[in-house]
Structure formats: structure tokens, C-alpha cells
Image (cartoon, rainbow, N blue to C red):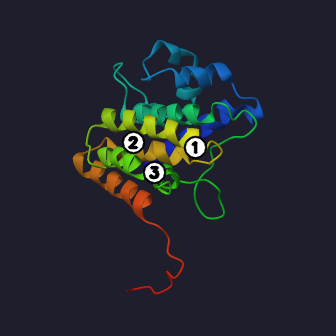
Amino acid sequence: MTNHISSITAKVIHQLWNNGKPNKGELAALRNSRHITDRNMTIVWPILFNAMKEKDLSKNGLPTYSEKAIFAALHCFAIYQQGNDGTLIYESAGRDKEGKALFFALQLLRQDQVRQKAIDRRVQTILGNSSFESIENSIYHLVQILKSNFPKEKIDFAQLASDFYAFQFSAETARQVCLMWGQQYYWIPKNNDNQKGE
């Protein structure tokens, strides 16, 4: 189920990027909107809703989990993409890919001893939270901090959409997502990690 959320998000990102000729009006609307229902978002709706499946669309005017998750990831993408007109900063994470899951990328901020405690506090607030709206807002701020320090890092915003989607289903799935984010943020690969089973 979350794979199709990732696919939709990736498709919309590539349409917004438009082969290196980004639609600045749509990206600005995404950056300046806090919710999918904001007036600014009406110029993004054609691309967004055309990419989505019927089952993901609201039937009553209240945004679905899909709509909220994809919007939140696209909002993060638009924040991070600003000022990177010559380079698409989105890439899928995985084998032979440059993209990183957001919380892996946030690890870069932890390496600065001066700011590590402050970043850790922000991340711990997210990891201990079960409110989607609260974590969504906190992640927006972390994306802004990451962008100001590592503006060229390639982030897998499509995966972030899948995470946002799963987070909303239940307290249990929210905790599973937080566990995954915590592992990505705190685990540091060891050079001698070839002793499996120990």
C-alpha cells in the first residue's frame, strides 16, 4: 500500500521538476502552504490529483491519509528544492542510488558537536510523538535546518511520503515508523561490521 504512495509522490516531484525547468509557481505554492486545503494549493491540485488513484481522493472534503502524506512530503521537497534550480535534490534511496532517507540525512547534523544536543532534542520530540500534525510541523523545521547546512544532499522524499502515510494509521504503525526513523538517525555504520550474529 505504501509503495503506491511513494510512486505517486515521485511522479509529482518529476512533474514539478519538469526536466530541469521547474515550475516555480507550483513550488512556491507548496512551500507557502501548511495544508493541502490552503488556497495556494489550488494551482498544484491539477498535477497532484491527476497522479493519484481514485481510492486515495477525499469523498467528503476532508483530506485522506494519502492526500495528507503526499502533500507533507511535497511541502518538504519544495522547501529543500528552493535555490537548487540547476539540480534536482530528490533521488530514491537504495542500492546504487545517491538518495538518502530523511533521517539518515539528518545524521549529518549530529556530526557537529556544537549543535548535536539541539538537533537530538528536536528529533526526540518527533520520535516520542503520536500526533501526525505535530510531527509534520517538526519535520518541516528539520528540513529547513538540513537545507541551510547541506543544501545539495539528495533526499528520498517519496519514501518520506510513505512514512507519513503509515504513521497515520494507528498508534502501533506510528511507533513502527518512529522506530525506523530512530534507527536511521542514531545508527552509525561500523567499518568492522562483518561479524554477523554477534
* Numbered circle sitting on residue 69: none
Q: Quadrant of residue 167?
A: top left
Quadrant in which the C terminus appears: bottom left
> Which residue is located at x 48 percent, y 55 percent?
107
Q: Are marks 1 and 3 in contact (CB under 8 Å)?
A: no
**Dot in front, 1 or 2:** 1
The residue wearing badge 2 is 165
Q: Is residue 31 visible?
A: yes
* Numbered circle sitting on residue 149: 1
Q: Amino acid at mark 2?
A: Tyr
Please tell me which residue lies in front, 137 or 57: 137
The residues tagged by marks 1 and 3 sit, at their Cα atoms, a distance apart of 13 Å
Mark 2 element type: helix
Residue 192: image location, x then y, percent: 52, 82
Mark 1 element type: helix
Label 3 CA crowd tier, 10 Å (few <14, some 14–19, many 20+) = few
**Dot in front, 2 or 3:** 3
The residues tagged by marks 1 and 2 sit, at their Cα atoms, a distance apart of 27 Å
Label 1 CA crowd tier, 10 Å (few <14, some 14–19, many 20+) = few
Q: Amino acid at mark 1?
A: Asn
Please tell me which residue lies in front, 100 or 14: 100
Q: Amino acid at mark 3?
A: Val
> Which residue is located at x 47 percent, y 45 percent?
160
Q: Is residue 52 visible?
A: no
* Numbered circle sitting on residue 114: 3
User: Is residue 72 placed above or below 36 in the rendered structure?
Assistant: below
